[in-house]
Image: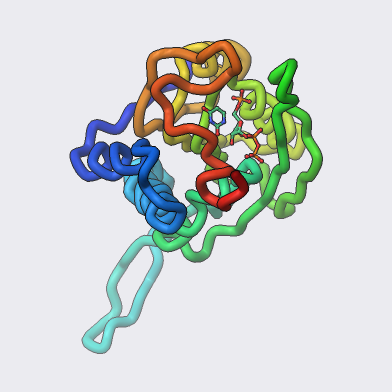
């Protein structure tokens, strides 16, 4: 069974509460989502492997460390894009792949419409990013696509999730650790997370 981490950090909670507020405007919403992404990335990368490197300071040579694995950030379009800048600020050398998914409004089934990844997926730590995990269908399909390209170390970065979605992901991809800012109550009858924060893509990009 994969590890599920729900961050209990006052700064993350504070920012998430403002993001949930329906009166928060698009600009503030986008910056909050990014800021939370950055705060989460610090913890999620805590166990990345390191290797020793020799460095010459202005004083002498010494041994330092560098990341032993490349990091690839993969947002699920569109809403995943909202967390990328915040994470990339912490790991500026990370490459970025993209996977496009949308949910059929009636069936709630995920449909993939775009995928582009760097070549070195099998050797990299992949941070799959989607702020909203509702039925889990989009994430399950995205993980399938990543594994097809050879990715082995996949960590899921979500913001808010419904228990239904998390159960489905853990059942189908028990090797993928999951990191969230909040695990909410349930899904409503049209597949939205309750209490959630509404339609994340629309709030990020002003499309409603
Ligand atoms: C939203 C959200 C997730 C997905 C979650 O995307 O960003 O990707 O729904 O739902 P699921 O867990 O039931 O699959 P949406 O389909 O609204 O597309 P958009 O981000 O392009 O608006
Ligand atoms: N996608 C969203 O943006 N919000 C939800 O509550 C569910 C899916």
Q: Nearer the viewer, residue 25 or 8?
A: 25
Q: Residue furthest left?
A: 10
Left-right relation of 10 to 206: left
The image position of residue 26, as x and y in percent, is 46, 53
Above or below — where is 171 with respect to 42?
Answer: above
Q: Nearer the viewer, residue 88 or 186?
A: 186
Left-right relation of 118 to 59: right
The image position of residue 55, as x and y in percent, is 35, 75
Left-right relation of 128 to 41: right
Q: Quadrant of residue 137?
A: top right
- Does residue 46 show up? no
Residue at x 28%, y 73% (from the top left corner) = 62
The image position of residue 98, as x and y in percent, is 68, 49
Protein image colouring? rainbow
Q: Nearer the viewer, residue 174 or 142?
A: 142
Q: Quadrant of ligand 1?
A: top right
Residue at x 32%, y 65% (from the top left corner) = 64
Above or below — where is 81 with respect to 106?
Answer: below
- Does residue 28 show up? yes
């Amino acid at each position: 069974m994969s590890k599920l981490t729900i961050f209990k950090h006052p700064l993350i909670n504070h920012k998430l509460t403002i993001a949930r507020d329906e009166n928060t405007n698009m600009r503030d919403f986008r910056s909050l989502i990014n800021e939370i992404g950055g705060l989460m990335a610090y913890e999620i990368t805590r166990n990345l492997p390191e290797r020793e490197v020799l460095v010459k300071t202005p004083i002498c040579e010494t041994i330092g460390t560098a990341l032993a694995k490349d990091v690839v950030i993969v947002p699920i379009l569109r809403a995943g894009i909202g967390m990328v800048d915040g994470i990339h600020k912490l790991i500026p050398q990370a490459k970025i792949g993209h996977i496009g998914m949308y949910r059929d409004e009636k069936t709630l089934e995920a449909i993939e419409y775009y995928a582009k990844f760097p070549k070195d997926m099998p050797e990299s730590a992949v941070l799959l990013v989607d702020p909203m995990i509702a039925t889990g269908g989009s994430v399950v399909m995205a993980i399938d696509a990543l594994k097809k390209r050879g990715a082995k170390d996949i960590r899921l970065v979500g913001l808010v999730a419904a228990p239904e979605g998390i159960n489905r992901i853990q059942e189908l991809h028990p090797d993928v650790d999951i990191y969230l800012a909040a695990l909410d109550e349930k899904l409503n009858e049209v597949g939205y997370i309750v209490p959630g924060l509404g339609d994340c893509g629309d709030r990020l990009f002003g499309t409603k």
